[in-house]
Amino acid sequence: MKRFALLLGLAVMMSWPASKAAAQMQSWSFGVLSQRSAVLTAQYWNPILDYVEKKTGVRLVLKAARTAPESNEATERGEYDFVYSNTIFQPKMAQANYQVILRPRDEAITGQIVTLESSPIRSLKDLEGKEVGFPSQAAFVGYAVPMDALLRQGINVTPVFGGNQEGIMGQLKAGRVIAAGVNSQVMKAFAARENVQYRVLWESPPFLNLPIAVHPRVPKAVVEAVRNAIDGMDNDPEGMKILEASAQVIGQKPPYGFRAATQADYQNYIDFYKHTLVKDIK
């Protein structure tokens, strides 16, 4: 009887779908668009990825490039299995074919052009001919969206790049740039953490915050396991505790967590890229 039970158990294990077996044996890369420092990125995401592994057996390994352009280059090459980025809608990313599976529950983001509260700059026209800071040429609401607005208003500025969102915010705080294009949420959290008083000179229409997307090579069973685990975190006491702790690291306000989503939820990104006047987006 014991031998029969052992053989039966082996037969069941051998009958598992290959995708489920892969989920137990293989790790999957989880790329994050560079906006904050590597330390803050790891402190925010690693507990969430550990939760997914505990709930599903799917091991996700955090990958964060030094700068947003480097993140985009890796994404364009399809190096990440999963990616947290809103640059996947660029036309040059079409071959990688990342597909949205989750969107954040928090409020939409906007692009802003900001200056310090003590600055003499009062309007966009005051920026004519001046250096303006941006995270990088890869930043959607931090560069593409505000630069598009400046071009449409005929305001000529000289871009200065800070590597990522908080890099250029640090330069603004230090007075190295007189104004900066930023992600509204990242700026709000940075200002609260660093005690920075700032003035918004211009703000874009809203865009859904960065989605989680997946490369077509990832098996459907793995995708569904990850999507369901992350989608349900805020309804699980353990998951909610992790989301709250991660949010505290970066100064994120509620609601926390993610919901299942599709490419169609991000149509205004796709439309923007079709019509933008900015030609040097990375």
Image (tube, rainbow, N blue to C red):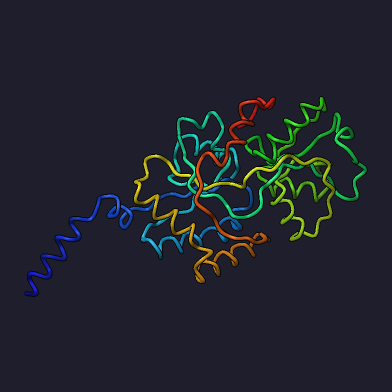
Taking depth in this image into account, of 79 and 175 the one nearest to the observer is 79
- Image coords of residue 155 (percent x, y): 82, 28
Q: Which residue is located at x 54 percent, y 67 percent?
A: 240
Vertical relation: 85 (above or below) 252: above
Exactly how many numbered labels are in the figure?
A: 0
- Looking at this view, name the residue that lies furthest to the front: 264
- Looking at this view, name the residue that lies furthest to the right: 120
Q: Which residue is located at x 58 percent, y 52 percent?
A: 104
- Image coords of residue 140 (percent x, y): 65, 38
In the rendered view of the protein, which quadrant contains the N terminus?
A: bottom left
Vertical relation: 123 (above or below) 31: above
Q: Which residue is located at x 56 percent, y 59 percent?
A: 257
- Image coords of residue 203 (percent x, y): 77, 41
Taking depth in this image into account, of 198 and 243 the one nearest to the observer is 243
* Left or right: 204, with 72 as reference point: right
Q: Which residue is located at x 77 percent, y 47 percent?
A: 171
* Left or right: 243, with 172 as reference point: left
In the rendered view of the protein, which quadrant contains the C terminus?
A: top right
Quadrant assignment, res 21: bottom left
Vertical relation: 267 (above or below) 114: above
Vertical relation: 27 (above or below) 141: below
- Image coords of residue 269 (percent x, y): 61, 36
